[in-house]
Amino acid sequence: MVDKDISKWKIKIGPILGLIGSVLLLIAGFRGFGVQSDIEDILAASALSWASIGFNPWILMTRTILTILFGAIGLIGTILLFNGKKLGAYLLLIVGSFAVLGMFIPIGTIIFLSTSIPVSLSYSFLLVEPFLILIGGILALVFKAYRGRISTMLNYIIKRVLVMIPTIFLVLLVTFILSTLMSQNINLNKLGGGLVPPELVELEKQRIGFYDPWFIKVAKYFTNFFSGNWGTSYIVLPDEPVIDLIVKIFPKTIELVIIPIILIPILSVKLGVISAKNRNNWKDTVVRSFMMIGVCIPVFWLATLLQYFFSVVLESFTYGAINLAIGNTNSVNVAGTYVPITGFRLIDAFLTNDQYLLQDSLMHMYLPAFCLVIVSLAGITRQTRASMLEVIQKDYVRTARAKGVPDKDVMNKHTLRNALIPASTTIVGTVAGLLTGSLFIEMSFNYTGMGFYMVQSILRGDYVVVSGMLVYTSIIILIGIIVADVLYTIIDPRIVYT
């Protein structure tokens, strides 16, 4: 059973979600008996999407029974959860995992009689049930594993989110002031410059509320922001809504930084540990030399050097020009052939089985990604090394060694966890910076991501886009601060937030 200090509703989140998902599964299964309607058939098939059964009416009865069977298993797991049994969480995890997996991948076994993927997002609200079941099992296990710590952390996260609200309002106010001061001639830019007749300029000013009192402008700005109207670009991508622009270019930044985000923490911590363990010998010298190079070399110079080496010296190793065209394609080799599906070029290449698009995207991504790893590794590695050297001198580390604890356990269990606390702040800050766009990298390689369009918007005076991206950047950084606080408690259980 769970501790009494955790409120009942928090402990029951997992079982309640599992209950909702299981009941939906059962309802869909019973509705499948004898149903001939296409809509009802889609609903039943969607609820059984984990099994990837097709719409063949000959197996409607089979998939209906399977729906009821797995719904019953989920219901049993929910009942066990309500009685404090961990087995219930595992049952929900099993059912939910099959559910979510089958929504995307045909399982293809005799048991499930898999023939196709019967997922119709436009028809069925019951697609939420696989995720409800899976999330229910995960949350139940998390709550039971951490108990009081989870309750305290949830309260802390709620407080931090509430603090974020006035911070976001302040950011909005600052961006409003900056955009207002810097875009006095926004109407002229939009209408084509200073050759526009004064009558049209006056009409445009009246249309955008140029003469409105400042408090009316502020009210409109806040209202438009929270309603999803962040303005429209008038120079960088004319007539493109800013929020649509961010949604369109964000996948490019994600594709570029996802590998560095994975590699940077792993490599930097490993190099920092190696350097600290081998202080003042050749391994430490090599790592410190690498850190010095990474800190001192300007990123734009490194980018230029890599472009020259791989484009001129090893010309056959590249795939066309390294610089990316502003648009959907990265190279003239696939110009006009790429139609975005998800917005992620690599995913779209797999979905459409387009090997040329895949090769083109990878060839234009690996050099910027390599630069990101090099310039980001140095700072985190140096922080990890310094923290490790400080912690190694602590009394509890010396005591552990005096007791005969193996050096590997001393470094990993006693030293590293405590040394990661300051390093985790740097890691989270680096990740947040990557997600908001790497200005120098994207500009150096002409990679059309968030950083590229941010610089273009500033240089060309498209301050509507600048304001939208500043707000987006602020939100990412605020979320990163909360994530860093959560990481502190995971790394060091002694840290308790109130």
Image (spheres, grey):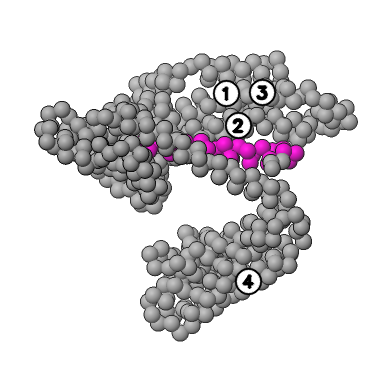
Q: Nearer the viewer, residue 48 or 363?
A: 48
State which tag comes first along the sequence, 4 or 2.
4
Marks 3/1: CA distance?
10 Å
Q: Position of 266 compared to 416: left or right?
A: left
Q: Disc 4 on helix, strand or loop?
A: helix
Residue lying furthest bottom: 34
For disc 2, the marked residue is: 425
For disc 1, the marked residue is: 379
Q: Disc 2 on helix, strand or loop?
A: helix
Q: Dot 1 surroundings within 10 Å: few (below 14), some, or many (20 or more)?
A: some
Residue 101 point in image, percent of width and height: 52, 60
State which tag comes first along the sequence, 3 or 2.
3
Height in image: 20 above or below 345?
A: below
Q: Position of 367 compared to 312: left or right?
A: right
Q: Disc 1 on helix, strand or loop?
A: helix
Which secondary structure class fits the magenta region best?
helix
Marks 4/2: CA distance?
42 Å
Q: Amino acid at mark 3?
A: Arg
Marks 1/2: CA distance?
12 Å
Q: Position of 416 compared to 157: left or right?
A: right
Marks 4/1: CA distance?
51 Å
- For the point 63% across and 56% down, the residue is 138
Residue 197 point in image, percent of width and height: 10, 33
Residue 307 point in image, percent of width and height: 38, 23
Residue 16 point in image, percent of width and height: 62, 65
Marks 3/4: CA distance?
51 Å
What residue span does the magenta drawing correspond to? 467-495
Q: Position of 478 compared to 77: left or right?
A: left
Q: Which mark is residue 75?
A: 4
